[in-house]
Amino acid sequence: MINIVGLGPGDLSLISYGAIEALKNSKKVFLRTEKHPVVKDLEKLTKFESLDHFYDENDDFDDVYRKISEFIVEEGKSEDVVYAVPGHPRVAEKTVDMIEKLAKENNIDVNVVASMSFVDAMFEALAFDPSNGFRLVDAFEMQTSYIDTDINLIVTQVYDEFIASEVKLYLMNRYDDEQEVYIVRGAGIKGEEFIKKVRLCELDWAENEFDYLTSLYVPRVENKKYNTVHDLELIMDKLRAPDGCDWDKKQTHESLKNSVIEEAYELYNAIENDDIDEMIEELGDVLLQVIFHCQIGKEEGMFDLGEVANGICTKLITRHPHIFGDANIDRDKFEKTWEEIKKKEKGESTITEGIKRIPVYLPALMKAEKVQHKAALVGFDWDDIYDVFSKVEEEYEEVREAYELDFAVFVAEKYPEKFAEMTKKVDITDELGNKLDVLEKIKEENLELLDEYHTLKIQYIKEELGDLLFSIVNLARFLDVDTTEALNGTIDKFVNRFGFVEEKVIESGKTFDEMSLEEMDKFWDQAKELEI
């Protein structure tokens, strides 16, 4: 049997009767730490062994707690033991949970004997009602804890100025720098209890004292600082409430779909401009779109932000088995492995299914690159970049051929019998005996074929031009060049040079209509020489 007892917040009077009896009647008592005010009184009640040496042997608290837990369970295999911890065993005491799990695996009974917790002592010292809500956070786990500024906060284990500084910096991201906080040391210990109110920005100042009995109390805020996704959720909920904004209330997934694209492009533009302030604003606009759609989904009973967050978290964990599991992945084949995982997630059996899953409305250059990349991952790709150059040249020539498609050739190839009939008369003359062009005469007499010719020619050019663009994207991929960035760069260059030409036209006192192309070309060449 393992009896886990609480030693209260630090005063012997706050230890429960059951805990005192367990300590007095046990032959084997272990204290997680001697660094507790009540220990001097325990020496009069029982003999005990301190486990502080585990802290001296290891700097990692998780390892310390694990080794202490394993030690206690091992001792409990042969005889009954008492394991005493500061405060209440169920409040901010990691080893208790570890011991219970290990004991269950080893068929050892565990009995927990409660005493007053340090949190209870803080309630009394600060005279606040916990029913109004509070959150208990370990200073060593601040980075992974959700801080809700709408409820009171207690931060434990603020041992020294360094930890206080870390806590301050983290909390200043969520609270105002002037937020009042309370340093509470020795809560519930007669003659040692100390409370000091300071501004958050002053928390780690030298005149403030910290030790292993120090915690921090942060009251709920009056002037809220909006800095969490939850804040945005609440605002959106209010905007779409019955008494909310008419415009926001009438929006649907369908009406908002273009906004997602627009906001994404505005963020892209901010990144291109290396404008941090603009990035912050545009990231907020993108986030708003996510929350907006989640709010609509929640109202319709279809999904909410929690489901969306769970989906992406699960996806990231599943697609990184080498990080969140023990899989051994070849870094050189990571992308291929990633595609295989996605293929399995989607229940796809072929590569083509994955290619077809690429969004239809994705910008064409980007979509082309993605299609080629997926095909390349399974080896369907050129071996030599010079083959790619040759393909570009080939497609260019085919575009020219499409443009230069002759009407006569079109009729001859598609309607050979009709062509033979139309060209029986080689020489055609008008009423005055003047010789006429045979082809022109044929066109006049076969207008329906001429319309078909023009339609086919446009279709032919479009098809061959598409092949050329696709081959150029392929070349860019081999050269490791982003086609969108490259084209945008050229567009910007054109706009700047055209602006220079326009300035020169204005300076000449003329209009564009009055300028010859040769004159404008001279201005353009000047812009190039100036590297505009």
Image (spheres, rainbow, N blue to C red):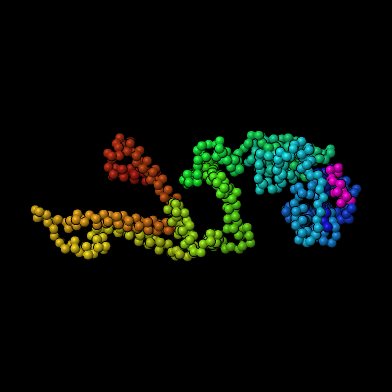
* x and y percentages locating residue 489 in the rendered image: 42, 48
Q: Is residue 83 left or right of residue 354?
A: right
* x and y percentages locating residue 523 in the rendered image: 33, 42
Q: Is residue 290 magenta?
A: no
Query: Could you say which quadrant of the image residue 235 lies in?
Result: top right
Query: Could you say which quadrant of the image residue 174 lies in?
Result: top right
Relative to 474, say whether 281 is above or below.
above
As drawn, the residue found furthest toward the left would be 432
Q: Which residues are magenta?
A: 12-24
- Between 492 and 423, the one nearer to me in the picture: 423
- Total numbered badges shown on the rendered structure: 0
Quadrant for the N terminus, please. bottom right
* x and y percentages locating residue 200 in the rendered image: 68, 37
Q: Main secondary structure of the magenta part?
A: helix
Q: Is residue 395 left or right of residue 368?
A: left
- Between 118 and 291, the one nearer to me in the picture: 291
Q: Residue at x 39, y 60 (%)?
A: 389
Q: Residue at x 66, y 39 (%)?
A: 150
- Between 138 and 60, the one nearer to me in the picture: 138
Q: Is residue 516 left or right of residue 421?
A: right
Q: Is residue 13 magenta?
A: yes
